[in-house]
Image: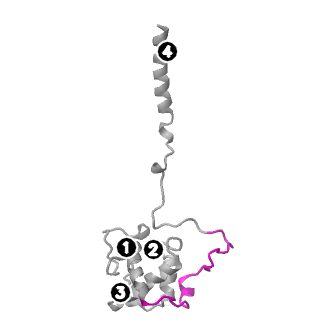
Amino acid sequence: MPNRLIHIGAVLGTLIAAGCDAPWHHEMRQQTSLSSAHSPREPAAGALPTDGEPRMDRTAGEALRNPLGPDAAVRGRWLYGVYCTPCHGISGTGDGPVPGHFSLGTKAPPADLTSDKVQQHSDGWMYGTIVNGTALMAPYRYELSPRDRWAIVTFVRQMRSGGR
């Protein structure tokens, strides 16, 4: 009888121990995570960048010039396909492949990158938009290097001229 009680106690102890952690799973696959369109939190106020790139906005970007030549459009096309196509679409007209899915949960369609409204701005303005995003677009300052941002700008300019 005591042997049987030990076995029953061991089984009950195992079951209780297995059930204790049930509501507190700490596995990475079950944690919430940010989508690829979200960036880490903003730096502290007054912090200086360590990568040598000053913080900027679209207006300040107007003065910047694209340091890359037309050959950068090849890489820009690939990057555009990864980062921009889901919202702006392959043609750049704002008809991304995910119907009804617009950036940051809005119902407004993404900008038509081939329109006069966008194309009238300088390359630096487009670069600044990629860096900081807009009210309808997430920023890509952490996901894309400066060279990759300029490559996308180069490709977007060629989209307008038909050089796809």
* Residue contact between numbered discs 1 and 2, judged by CB atoms under 8 Å: yes
Q: Secondary structure at mark 4?
A: helix
Q: Quadrant of residue 136?
A: bottom left
Which of the two discs, 4 and 1, labels the residue nearer the N terminus? 4
Q: Which numbered tag is attached to residue 145?
A: none
Disc 1 designates what residue? 87
The residue labelled by disc 4 is 6
Q: Which residue is mark 3?
A: 159
Of the residues shown, which amino acid type is indicated by label 4?
A: Ile
- Viewer-side residue, 71 vs 34: 71
**Residue pictured at 52% horizontal, 77% vertical:** 131
Q: Position of residue 43 (x, y in %)?
A: 62, 69
Q: Residues within 10 Å of mark 1 (few under 14, many from 20)?
A: many
The numbered mark, 4 or 2, whose residue comes first in the sequence reads: 4
Q: Which residues are magenta?
A: 43-70
Amino acid on which the number 1 mark rests in the picture? Cys
Give percent across and percent down for residue 23. Answer: 48, 39
Q: Real-space Cα distance between discs 4 and 2?
A: 63 Å
CA separation in Å, label 3 and label 1: 16 Å
Circle 2: is it few (<14), some (14-19), or many (20+) Cα within 10 Å?
many
Residue 37 counted in the magenta span: no
- Which-is-in-front pick, marks 3 and 1? 3
Residue 142 visible in the current orientation: yes
Q: Earlier in the sequence, mark 1 or mark 2?
A: 1
Mark 2 lies on residue: 137
Amino acid residing under circle 2? Met
Q: How is the image coloured?
A: one colour
Q: Identify the residue at image location x=49%, y=42%.
A: 25
